[in-house]
Image (tube, grey):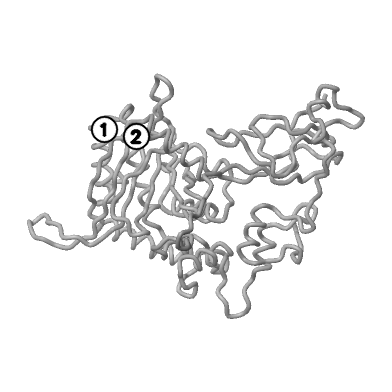
């Protein structure tokens, strides 16, 4: 019996996906679990595996075509088996369209990296399936001449856009390669805006990731009554502890603990104490979720994406640091998979690296709250002895869904979180 190949639903709010490339041709033998085609959503690009062993037949979606999720896009037949008359009629003329591979077949990620690095794919020897050019092949072809800084194509592009000198950055990647996330940690200004001439109107389509963000944020702000709270945090104790962690990280040769990573750890601790902030509203029921999966907002050229640190309450600082670093790098290089962005129960959005002192974020549905973190700045404060001293101060603003979270609950959560950031040893309590 023919086995249908279904266009998969990779995300909760996903309605369609674009077919990028077929990795097998019509009539070619495939094995169960073997990559069959590549599809792209507004957030990720993934390979779809064959649901069975057999022969690919009845292909009804061509590269570049947008296909609704769960729709049949092909069939896997057994040798000698034929499609039924009804299935053949549904497929129509699409089954006869040729699906040639390019002269230099490459994965979508490899194509983006090659475009950013100016690498000619036709000159790259592919090491992937059937000679396909992979990300590793492009990175090897983009190796700098002797004396030049080792950096990924995404890092070079980000450095050019943000006018950052790669020579001044210590790379955290393999063999000291500078990653995109390394550039982001030292760049405090966004990339250049489009150049608009006098009397000229530049039209940018509201499409792809930008359209998805617009629809989700509009729905969130319309449906969830937002209530916001802002507190100031004395970061003196936080910075001392972070310096200790980073001294240990440097000695071990692992990524340094970022402010975001340590905040994720403190947030996870506070969420376990206040489960209504780690919940979701489903119809007439509030579901208090058992896992604490903290999303970390990452800014891309196309918009915002929120990869997730899973079970953050069960992980140590070193593990969270490595996880946040890995997710940020892969987000900026277009390498996140569906599992990396699904299942978040709370979101942290840190605009401190951009110099933003305070802002209010819109809740990422179906979550109940989001934390907006600003930059740490020296400010005068009154100490315990009544003296005015200068301390590093950070402001954070909590936005919560008032249908789920009352003001007192949100205030207690923020009070505990502030206390944990000011005295990080409390997390051990």
Q: Residue placed at 40% from the left, 26% from the top?
A: 281
- Is residue 161 positioned above or below 111 on the image? below
Residue 387 lies left or right of residue 85; in this view the side is left
Dot 1 falls on a residue whose secondary structure is helix
Q: Position of residue 157 (x, y in %)?
A: 54, 65
Q: Is residue 362 above or below residue 387?
A: above
Q: Which residue is mark 2?
A: 277
Q: Taking the image as drawn, is residue 425 in sight?
A: no
Residue tagged 1: 409
Q: Residue furthest right?
A: 80
Q: Quadrant of residue 42?
A: top right
Mark 1 touching mark 2, by CB under 8 A?
A: yes
Q: Secondary structure at mark 2?
A: helix
User: Given the current orientation, which residue lies at the most extreme left position?
Assistant: 386
Q: Residues within 10 Å of mark 1 (few under 14, many from 20)?
A: some
Relative to residue 56, is residue 258 drawn left or right?
left
Residue at 30 percent of width and 30 percent of height = 402
Residue 232 locus on image (x, y percent): 22, 50
Going from N to C along the chain, the mark reached first, 1 or 2, is 2
Q: Residues within 10 Å of mark 2 (few under 14, many from 20)?
A: many
Quarter of the image that includes the N terminus: top right
Vertical order, 126 against 19 (above or below): below
**Residue 314 position in % (x across, y down):** 43, 42
Q: Residue at x 54, y 69 (%)?
A: 176
Residue 192 is left or right of residue 175, and the answer is: left
Q: CA distance from mark 1 to mark 2?
A: 8 Å
Q: Quadrant of residue 364?
A: top left
Specify the farthest residue to the top: 284
Q: Is residue 126 visible?
A: yes
User: Can you say which quadrant of the picture contains the C terminus?
Assistant: top left
Residue closest to the eye, 317 or 143: 143
Q: Position of residue 356 (x, y in %)?
A: 32, 56
């Amino acid at each position: 019996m023919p086995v249908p190949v279904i266009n998969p639903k990779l995300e909760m709010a996903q309605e369609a996906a674009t077919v990028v490339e077929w990795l097998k041709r019509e009539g070619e033998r495939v094995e169960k679990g073997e990559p069959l085609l590549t599809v792209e959503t507004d957030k990720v690009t993934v390979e779809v595996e064959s649901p069975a062993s057999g022969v690919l037949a009845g292909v009804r979606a061509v590269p570049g075509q947008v296909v609704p999720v769960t729709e049949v896009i092909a069939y896997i037949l057994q040798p000698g088996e034929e499609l039924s008359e009804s299935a053949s009629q549904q497929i129509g003329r699409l089954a006869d369209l040729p699906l040639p591979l390019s002269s230099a077949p490459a994965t979508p990620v490899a194509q983006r990296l090659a475009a950013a690095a100016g690498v000619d794919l036709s000159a790259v020897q592919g090491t992937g399936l059937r000679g396909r050019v992979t990300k590793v092949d492009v990175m090897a072809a983009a190796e700098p001449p002797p004396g030049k800084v080792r950096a990924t194509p995404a890092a070079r592009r980000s450095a050019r856009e943000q006018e950052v000198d790669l020579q001044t950055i210590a790379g955290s990647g393999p063999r000291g390669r500078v990653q995109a996330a390394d550039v982001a940690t030292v760049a405090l200004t966004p990339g250049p805006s489009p150049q608009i001439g006098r009397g000229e109107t530049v039209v940018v389509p509201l499409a792809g990731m930008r359209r998805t963000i617009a629809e989700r944020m509009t729905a969130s702000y319309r449906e969830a009554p937002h209530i916001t709270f802002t507190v100031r945090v004395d970061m003196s104790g936080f910075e001392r502890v972070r310096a200790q962690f980073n001294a240990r990280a440097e000695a071990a040769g692992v990524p340094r603990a970022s402010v975001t990573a340590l905040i994720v750890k403190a947030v996870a601790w506070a969420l376990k104490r206040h489960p209504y902030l780690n919940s979701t509203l489903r119809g007439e029921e509030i579901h208090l979720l058992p896992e604490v999966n903290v999303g970390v907002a990452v800014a891309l050229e196309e918009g915002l994406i929120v990869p997730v640190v899973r079970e953050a309450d069960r992980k140590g600082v070193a593990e969270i640091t490595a996880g946040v670093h890995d997710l940020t790098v892969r987000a900026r290089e277009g390498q996140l998979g569906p599992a990396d962005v699904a299942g978040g129960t709370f979101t942290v959005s840190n605009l401190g690296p951009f110099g933003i002192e305070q802002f209010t974020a819109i809740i990422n549905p179906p979550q109940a709250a989001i934390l907006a973190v600003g930059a740490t700045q020296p400010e005068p404060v009154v100490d315990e002895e009544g003296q005015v001293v200068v301390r590093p101060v950070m402001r954070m603003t909590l936005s919560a869904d008032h249908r789920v979270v009352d003001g007192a609950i949100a205030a207690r959560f923020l009070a505990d979180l502030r206390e944990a950031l000011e005295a990080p040893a409390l997390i051990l309590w």
